[in-house]
Image (cartoon, rainbow, N blue to C red):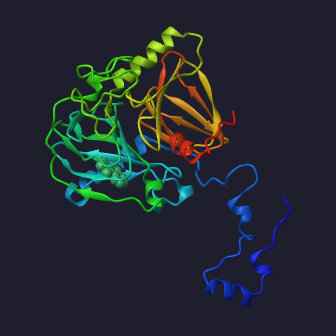
Amino acid sequence: MHELGRLEDLPQAYRDELTALNLVPLWPSLRAVLPPGVPTRNTQPTHWPYQSLRPLLMQAGELTPMEKAERRVLVLANPGHGLENMKASPAMYLGMQLLLPGEWAPSHRHTPNAVRMIVEGEGAYTTVDGEKCPMERGDLILTPTGLWHEHGHDGTDPVVWLDVLDLPVIYYAETSYAIEGQRQEVKPGHGEQAYARGGVAPTPLFVRQNGEAGAGAGAVASHGGYPMLRYPWADAKAALQAMAADLPGQEAIQITYINPETGKDAQNNLGFYALMLRPGQTLRLPARSPSCVFHQIEGGTDVAVEGHTFTLAEADTCCTPGYTAVTLTNRSASAPAFVFMADESPFHRKLGVYENRG
Ligand code: 1HN
């Protein structure tokens, strides 16, 4: 690719005239916005060890009462995007949130889509669109766009969870806003009960036709098209273990968190997955366009990317840029490792730019 003209090559008077009319010449910037072969990525491989951030999060619990925080969160910010921009990657926001016993995070709803991955503690719950979801280690709880949500804590010890939001892209599109609300009335019914067994779905007296979604027709709340809000870790782990036992020759033991009525990704813009690495296993993930986030649920994993190797201990989180292969190695020779993953695949597919380069 040959070099194009620079801004400095143009007479200052001409540049001033352009500026005065809100005009910009393309050619000095063309190569920057369309680099050859692979995009420029600001996302730096970044590791957030839980043991180093936890004391600071607990300190936030002493320094800042809930009334002054609303959501008491330390944001996991990627230095490549500028810490103040609160991005782990172009489309992903990550935060570690602390709720202390007896505290309550008031009800609101907003345009960004959120999920919580529960990291530590017992006794807290989040109520989403009237469904009370208990929070236990490893559970994934959805807060899809527009649904009311609030958090409470009836237990005795601090509860911490990882928030994953598509906030950067919703904010970029100038579509991010919130509405404050009243405490929700809890309604009966739990999606994780109605959809607890694979291959069968609730059917309110033959309302369901072949291939037609039935949720919302009475037996279970549809929550605006998101009938399953809580994905218990016990069930996800059991699915991974059953698959590993059933297919001893299969390399990748991975599940996708899906909407059980549509079979599609559980949420609009971000994809959520869990992986099991057999004892001692090394698994190479292909170079794909989306950035990824890895969070260690159980065990320990080495994450190798672009010459860095992050040693993930339990509750550690890291992120990797797109278009880059990632190699995961279970550090234990005797126990499996379980990793939660989030990525930008649904967003890339919607944009029509999703790539798997192998
Ligand atoms: C939010 O609503 C929560 O509800 C957590 O717990 C983090 C970050 C940005 C915007 C909204 C919550 C958030 C958030």
Residue 249 visible to an observer of this rendering? yes
Q: Position of residue 117 (x, y in %)?
A: 37, 37
Residue at position x 64%, y 79% from top? 23
- The residue closer to the viewer here, 353 or 161, is 353
Residue at the far right in the pictured view: 2
From the viewer's perspective, is 15 left or right of 212? right
- The residue closer to the viewer here, 346 or 324, is 346
From the viewer's perspective, is 307 left or right of 181? right
Q: Could you tell me which quadrant the C terminus lies in? A: top right
Identify the image quadrant of residue 184.
top left
Q: How many marks?
A: 0
Identify the image quadrant of residue 52.
top left
Residue 58 visible to an observer of this rendering? no
Q: Position of residue 5 (x, y in %)?
A: 81, 73
Q: Position of residue 1 (x, y in %)?
A: 84, 58
Q: Position of residue 312 (x, y in %)?
A: 50, 35
Relative height, residue 287 to residue 233 (above, below)? below
Residue at the far bottom in the pictured view: 13
- The residue closer to the viewer here, 100 or 54, is 100
Relative height, residue 28 to residue 148 (above, below)? below
- The residue closer to the viewer here, 76 or 224, is 224
Relative height, residue 195 to residue 95 (above, below)? above
From the viewer's perspective, is 5 left or right of 214? right
